[in-house]
Amino acid sequence: MDMEARGRSEHPEALRLWLRMLTLTQLIEKQVRTQLREQFGTTLPRFDLMAQLERKPDGLKMNELSRRMMVTGGNVTGITDQLAGEGLVERVEVEGDRRAYRVRLTPAGRALFGEMARQHEICIVAAFDSLSPAQAQTLHQLLGKVKQHYHRDTLPESE
């Protein structure tokens, strides 16, 4: 019996499934973090922030970034400062609000993110290489059924 099946419960299959999903998520995330660090000298939070900005070419306010990334404003500010210092993002004033500004990718940031996104996709595709297309589609549908139990506004916008 594997580590996931060791617990005693009235609902061992649900717990085993949860642990299997958690373990798989952690393994894939570790691979993604390693890839980003080794190939691009960057971190997953920086990639995530750039991904949010890539979806919104006009940029996002800091509070929007915090909400989308589900992290504190301080975390977003620190990452934004780093990326701005490297010329990958820029701050743009918000018309009518001198205290607020939008953050958006620079052309250099957009180009770098494009390459990181291509490599990220290769990594994710490889993670599911052992599944046939039909198996992957079935897994996606089954996980979608589980997701339906939760309110959409409590989950990230991406699947």
Image: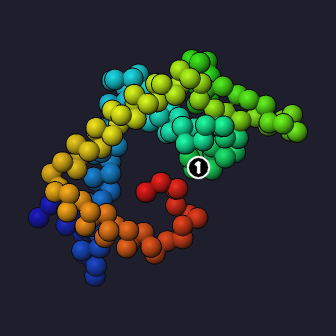
Q: Quadrant of the C terminus?
A: bottom left
Instruction: Classify residue 121 as left or right of residue 63.
Output: left
Q: Quadrant of the N terminus?
A: bottom left
Expressed as whole percent of the image width and height from the top left, the position of residue 103 reads 67, 33
Looking at the image, can residue 87 be seen? yes
Q: Secondary structure at mark 1?
A: helix
Residue at (28% x, 38% y) in the render: 122
Q: Would you say residue 78 is visible in this rendering?
A: no
Q: Is residue 5 left or right of residue 88?
A: left
- Looking at the image, residue 108 lies above or below residue 7: above
> In the image, what residue occupies the spot 22% across and 50% down?
128
Count how many numbered circles sit on residues in the image: 1
Disc 1 packing (10 Å; few <14; some 14–19; many ≥20): some
Residue lying furthest left: 1
Q: Which of these two is toward me, 41 or 88?
A: 88
> Is 119 situated left or right of 109 in this image?
left
Looking at the image, which residue sits at the far bottom? Answer: 10
Furthest toward the top, the residue is 86
> Residue 12 placed where, x, y %?
25, 75
On the image, the x and y values in percent for residue 140 come to 31, 63
Q: Amino acid at mark 1?
A: Arg
Residue at x 42%, y 69% (from the top left corner): 147
Of residues 133 and 157, the one drawn nearer to the viewer in this rendering: 133
Look at mark 1 in the image and give the residue it sits on.
68
Q: Nearer the viewer, residue 10 or 103?
A: 103
